[in-house]
Each structure stands twice: as C-alpha cells, then as structure tokens.
Amino acid sequence: MEKEGSGETPKITQAMISAYDEYTHLHLDRRKFMERLSVLAGSGAAAAAIAPMLAADGARAEIVPDTDDRLAIEDVTFPGTKGVMMRGYLVRPKSATGPRGGVIVIHENRGLNNHIKDITRRMALEGFNALAVDFLSPLGGTPADEDQARQMFSTLDAVDTAANAEAARTYLAGIDGANGKVGAVGFCWGGGTVNNFAVHSPDLNAGVAYYGAQPKADDVPAIKAPLMFHYGGLDERINAGIPAYREALEKNGKTFEIFVYEGVNHAFNNDTSAARYDKAAADLAWSRTVEFFKKYLS
C-alpha cells in the first residue's frame, strides 16, 4: 500500500503492531490508539495510511470463492444452551465419499466474518464437514462493525460459550455424511475458546488453537482431546502463558504439539491483515493442522 501522491510505502514497526494488538485485545480505545500511532508514525497523515494496513481488510477475504462448485454451502441454526438458537455456516465437500470427520471453525474477536467463512471453505476442501459458528448468536449475531463486535465479546460467559461449542459438536457429529468425530480449530479469541472447549468437552476428538489464551493449569487434567498449538514468536502477550501450559500438559500426560513460528506476529494466519500475515508460517501451520485432523478425525 502506498501513500497517495507519493511513491513511499509507509513503514510499519513492531511498536505499531503492538499498539494495534493492545487496541484490539486489551483496553486501548481507538482515539488513544490513533494518537499513539501518530506519534510512532511521525504524523497523523502517516498514521491514517498505516492503520488500514494493520487492520483486517474484509475485501481480501476470499481464497476459495463461495461459488466454488466443489462445495455444498448453507446457513444453518442449531439449539445452543439456555434456549439460544446458534447460527452457523456449514460447508461440505461434494466429492467426498463415505463418512467424514467434522471441524468446527471458531472465529477471532471480530465474529463470524467473510475471512472465517473462507477458512471454513478451505477446510471443507481438505475433505471435512466444516462448520463456522457465530458465537455472538446469544447477543443477536455478529454485527457489521468490528469495534462493536469486539466490545460484545467481553459480555460472553465462558461456560456458556463452551456449552454452545459442545452443542455445535453434537450437531456436526450428527449431520448426513458425518463419521461422528469432530475437532475444532480457532484463531485468537477462537484459539482460547478451543482451549476452553477442550477443558469442558470429554467428547471433542481434536483441537487446534492458533495464538489462543491458555486455560488455568488446574483445568488441564480435564482435557481429553489431543491438541496442537500455533504461536507467533513475536506475540509476547499470548506466549507468556506457554511455559505453564506446557508444564501442566506434560505433568498430566496429555497428547499435544506446540509450534512457535519465529519472527511472526499474533494473527500471522490472517491473510486479510497485510502487516501481520506471514504466508510461510501460515502455510506451514495449515499443513500441520490438516494432517493433525486427518490423523484424529478419520
């Protein structure tokens, strides 16, 4: 991305990425974020040019188009906890023969958006029944405004969310063409949700968490599913929880794999975010994820 009227590409620093992470995950509001970014960038104009590069661009969120004739796609609903009807985006491969495993795709703290739907289509092309769940369904569903969506996540109850994930597992295990085995993959907030889901569901068959917050060590004994974790080497906020989590998993004899991709940031898998996406790390993590699911969901 170039500044209009110049040939210079705005330079994005790690401090800018860290400020954006604080804005989207902690307690820095947009005004203070832009003020900090202006200082880091040297001017308000430079900050205005850089901010869209740090953010996710929904217009780029289509690797597999929703018109791909290899896929059967539908919007679905299923019963969640406390009488809530959960919304989902179900994608199945048309060419798959015989019963197949299912994968729940759990979104970031932006909700069920086009990027997550695209990931769901990619997963279906790997031979799985894939279901992206809108975990904001209890609050009316994912809004168009990402800032509003992020604020809504703070009001969700973690136990209810785990119960709704379990409801998604039950639903996906029972659809036509299912073999009864279900895994879950999640990104950012969704990665933390996979960890929480694994604590609460003895019937989850496999879980993959991308840069997700870790559960308490005391909760680890309850985990039954084999787990895989992908972390960005520069993601100090999330990575601070790795040692304790690894120790608890090892102590309790759990099946798990941890991969840290050096030199890449939180959200390195999100190809709609120009500043943070790292294709090499994303492709490697994806290939590992797919093989993991083929091992445990077949």
Image (spheres, rainbow, N blue to C red):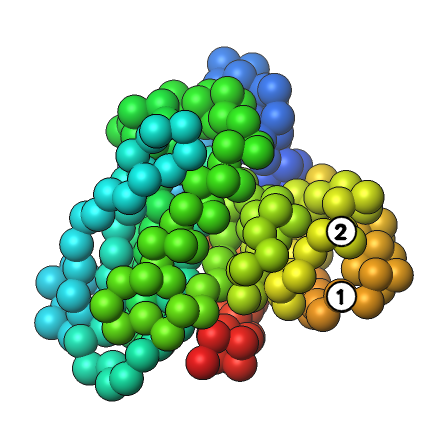
Q: Could you tell me if residue 223 is visible in this image?
A: yes
For disc 2, the neighbor class at 10 Å (few under 14, some 14 to 19, many from 20) is many
Query: Would residue 121 be visible to someone looking at this image?
Result: no
Residue furthest out toward the top: 31
Which circle's residue, 2 or 1, is located before the other in the chain?
2
Residue 123 image-quadrant placement: bottom left
- Nearest the eye: 150 or 263: 150
> Residue 115, percent across and down?
33, 50
The answer to which of 206 and 192 lies nearer the viewer is: 206
Instruction: Tell me the kind of residue under disc 2.
Output: Val
Q: Please state, as top left, top right, bottom left or bottom right, where the C terminus lies in the image.
A: bottom left
The structure residue drawn at horizontal position 42% and vertical position 34%, both measured from the top left corner, is: 81
Contact between labelled residues 1 and 2, with CB atoms less than 8 Å apart: yes
Q: Is residue 232 left or right of residue 294?
A: right
Circle 1: residue type: Lys
* Residue for badge 2: 220
The image quarter in which residue 56 lies? top left
Label 1 crowd (10 A; few <14 / some 14-19 / many >=20): some
Q: Which residue is mark 1?
A: 254
Label at residue 218? none
- Residue 171 lies, in percent from the top left, at 34, 54
Query: Which residue: 37% across, 63% down?
Result: 173
As displayed, is residue 140 above or below residue 57?
above
Q: Position of residue 38 (x, y in %)?
A: 54, 23
Image height of 87 relative to 132, above or below: above
Relative side of 243 to 297, left or right: right
Residue 80 point in image, percent of width and height? 37, 38
Give the residue at x 46% y 46%: 165
| Residue drawn where x is 53% and y is 81% of the image | 295
Task: Tell me if residue 63 comes above or below residue 236 in the rendering.
Answer: below
C-alpha gap between disc 2 and disc 1: 9 Å
